[in-house]
Every structure is written in C-alpha cells, then in structure tokens.
Image: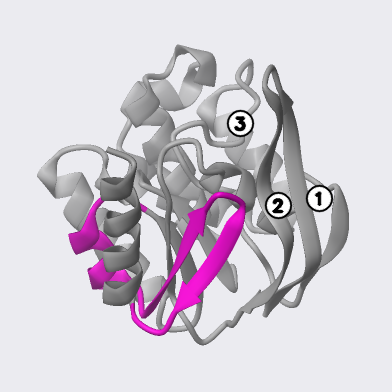
Amino acid sequence: MIRLENVHKSYPTKSGRKVILREFSGAFENSRNVGILGHNGAGKSTLFRLLSGAEAPDRGRIIREGRVSWPLGFSGGFHNSLTGRENVRFICQIYGASYREVLSFVEDFAAIGRFMDMPVKSYSSGMKARLAFGISMALNFDYYLIDEVVAVGDAAFKKKSKTVLSERLKSSSVLLVSHSAQLLKEFCDVGGVLHNGELVFYPTIDEAIAVHEANQNATI
C-alpha cells in the first residue's frame, strides 16, 4: 500500500502558488490497478514523483509499503551522458538486480540495437521510452508508475508492451496515466481524477473517465 497522510504540494507561479494536492489523505491499495486522469497541467506527473519519492511534499507524509518504480514516461530517469548499457548497470546496482539478466531482457525488449552503446542524450523520446519501459519491466516492483509509455512506438511494440505489463500485473499493481480511455479500461480497475488540487477516487474506471470528461467540457 502507498498511503498519503495530509499531503500538500504546490508550486510558485507568476499568478501565485499553484496547488497540486491540497491536504490529501488516501491510499493506493496493492490489489487495485488505478487510472489517474486530469487535464494537462493538473499535476499528474508531480503526483507520480511524490509517490515514487523523487519529490517531497510541502507538508504531510507518504508511506510506501512495497517496492515502487520510478515514474515511467518519456523523460525516464536516466543519466543522459551515460550509454543505455551503462544506465542499465547503474540501475541494477541501485536495485540489487542481476546486470546480466536485466541487460538481456532490455536488449531484446527495447530493440534499439547499436544505440545501447550510445549516450542516452542522443536518443529520441521514443527510444528513451523503450529503454525505460524495458528496464522497469525487467525489475520486480510491487507498484509500476506508468505515464503513457505503453502507447508509444509501432503496433508491434505496443503489443509487446501490453503483453509484458499484463504478465507483471499478475503479482503487482499499476498506476497508469493515459489520455486513452481504451488503455485505461484495459488495465485499470478503479480511477482517480486530479482536478484543482483535489484527488478523488471512483469505484470504477468508467466513472472516473466520465467525471474527467465532464471537467474537460466545463472548461471549454
């Protein structure tokens, strides 16, 4: 379980502080796959950074029971001056994983060939996504934080991504941010809508999608 207790997070802007989460208390249970929805700029990426521990709240605390992945999206969490292969080694050292096993999986899954030996800063966003998703899926997490990455690439890569994610979810949970209602319905049981600093959970992903669409229409 990932439990948040009175978590508050905001950022300074020219027009004042923008509140991402306002004194939020709640939990992400390890038996549920959660789709997170919100308009662009609502703070979904910030929420993921908070959940992973990459960023700290202004107030409150976040309690993680289990292994939580880094936020997995286009930006990844790489050292850009290192090669793909060197990033794999570095991450394996952090998580105590077998470099040989992880590298073998990543090379096969990401299928970026000679770019494994080139600096990540030379990668396209799609290549970074392939590498990041491959490394994450090669490691055993209780929670996978995924931001749209299964929607990148060609049809073959999308199919491969969905297949391996489905396999991991037999023993783990996913928190998924996506603009694709179809993708959310495919992988998520429940939904959470982040809107104006409030995160509200709904018992089904369909209800969350409906609320999010209503919020979107209200701003048009």
Residue occupying the point 26% across, 74% down:
206
Q: Position of residue 90 (x, y in %)?
A: 70, 39
Using the image, tell me which numbered label, if any, was put on residue 78.
Answer: 3
Q: Which residue is mark 1?
A: 57
Between discs 2 and 3, the one toward the N terminus:
2
- The span picked out in magenta is 178-204
Disc number lying in front (3 or 1)? 1
Q: Is residue 74 above or below residue 115?
A: below
Tag 2 and tag 3, C-beta contact below 8 Å: no
Q: Which residue is mark 2?
A: 50
Would you identify the image quadrant in which residue 164 lies? bottom left
Q: Nearer the viewer, residue 68 or 14?
A: 14
Separation of residues labelled 1 and 2 (CA atoms): 7 Å
Q: Position of residue 99 (x, y in %)?
A: 61, 50
Identity of the amino acid at label 3?
Phe
Using the image, tell me which numbered label, if any, was put on residue 35.
Answer: none
Separation of residues labelled 2 and 3 (CA atoms): 18 Å
Quarter of the image with the N terminus is bottom right
